[in-house]
Amino acid sequence: MNNIKIWTITLMLLTGIFLSSCNDDDEVKIPEVSFETASYNLSETSTSTLEVKVILNMNAPQDITVNFTISGTAVVDVNYEAISNKSVTISSGSSEAIIFVKAINEPTIEGDKAIEFTLESGDNYILASTNTVATVMIEDNEVASGDAPVVQFTSDHVTTNAFLQDTVEVRVGLDKAFASTTTVPISFGGTAEIGTDYEVLDLADAQSISFDADMLSLTFRLAVKYNEIPDLDKTVEITFPEPIVTDYKVSETNDTIKINIIDPVVDMSAWFNDNTKIESFHEGGNTSAYRDDFYAYNVKRYYWNPIEEGGKYSILTGEHHFVPSTTKLNSWTEAINIYQKLIGFPGVDVPEEERWEIQTGGEGDFFGLFKFFGNLAEYGKTLIESENDWLRFVALNSDASEGKVMVPAQTLTLYKVKPGFDWQESFTASDGVENYRAWFADSNTTQGHLGQSTNVETTQIVIHGGEGTYSNASEEIIFEVTFTCDDPDFNIDHNYYISNNGDTYTMKIKYVKP
């Protein structure tokens, strides 16, 4: 009996040992997959194939297929040869497989490019906690050779006033010529907009310039537009992008040109202030009261006399009145007040003396042209109005302290007394005491609008334009103006003009503070 018990216990122990041994041998282990290393470097000029290893932490118990994805900045078939199969197979009993990477020597300068491999999960393996992403950096080797031509702008800054609507030339130079036709990209930036503030001329696409072989420079143009924007200050920035080819290099110092398009408000306080303000414009009616809503500013005017003393400035008028234009930026225009004198106004004592008058202040004529006619009609003063204002100030720097003064081209209409009508004929009034002029009744008919009179005929002076300078520092405005008048009654002495060609004359005018 005891022997039976001993054998039973022994059998049970042996069975336990046996079973325990079987469980250890049968435990299932799942392979972990990763890349051998997380980063690789590959020169784009390398003729060898880079091996990117996918590894297991053990020998594969069976064939294991591992999928992966490809991303990054490198472009297939541009920076590296296509990898058509996006998986590798680790054979049973092995612990690695290889992804082969072949770089392409891309000829442009584009910087280093990255290929990023990322392992995907599978059914018969798990991803390791590290190195599941491998980056291959394809190193760019392109640089321009030391003797490659250097491209550069020949100037770095240009300022122009939009009012001038200039065509700005941009010159690009090389320190040595290209051997063959070469295209150089350019870019346009800044606050000014193509199409709105300027147009690019001479370039087909406004994105590149093309040098023919043996050329050392070329020029393209920008046409500036005028949009009547007050206090305009915009910039065009033209640059050379970083080269992507080895044919040339960009100058380190002259790689950008800035074109400043301005039209700042010109400070006229030196001219238009309380000391020069004229407020003696009549309200009209039966009182000599002055208007409180109408005024002008007084300036003094000279002309260049080429005859006397070898040439000098002579007084053209002792005073002359301007007002700032209310419709056009930086412009001066005329001050014209048309008013009615009724009985009670000083000097108007009888109905026949009632009349309309034109009050312009001073001579009322900006270039002194009235003095060259002897038969102009006038209601106290004659009338001349500009179509485009008289003077336009064009600043050439941001603070507008100096610049150009432009005389806009326009046609001026003047009014001459018709032959046979005595404009100044005097009559005795009904009271037998006072006298009145023929034009008094004419003005009442037209209510001061001289051009509506049936006793006048028109003549014209064509202003071709003019140009000069202004300076707030010197407080001088000097310009030349060219005009044509073929009216036989126009008679100008040679003292007043500096040149002429038939009926076309050029005068030189200077305005100063009174």
Image (cartoon, rainbow, N blue to C red):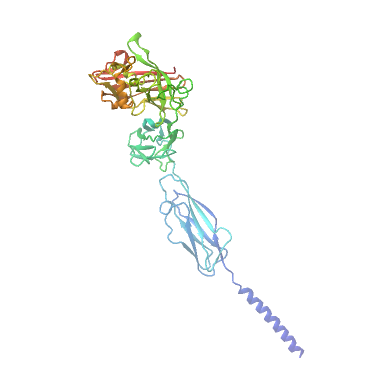
Q: Quadrant of residue 150?
A: top left
Position of the C terminus, as image quadrant, is top left
- Tell me where residue 422 appears, x and y as whole percent: 26, 17
**In the rendered image of this protein, does residue 201 appear above or below residue 332?**
below
Position of the N terminus, as image quadrant, is bottom right
Question: 487 or 261, which lies in front?
Answer: 487
Asked if residue 462 can be seen in this view, the reply is no
- Tell me where residue 398 appears, x and y as whole percent: 46, 29
Q: Quadrant of residue 159?
A: top left
- Tell me where residue 507 appears, x and y as whole percent: 33, 18
Q: Residue furthest front?
A: 431
Asked if residue 121 can be seen in this view, the reply is yes
Question: 472 or 191, which lies in front?
Answer: 472
Question: 198 or 326, which lies in front?
Answer: 326
- Tell me where residue 365 appears, x and y as whole percent: 35, 21
Q: Quadrant of residue 233?
A: top left
**In the rendered image of this protein, does residue 426 appear above or below residue 57?**
above
> How many numbered marks appear?
0
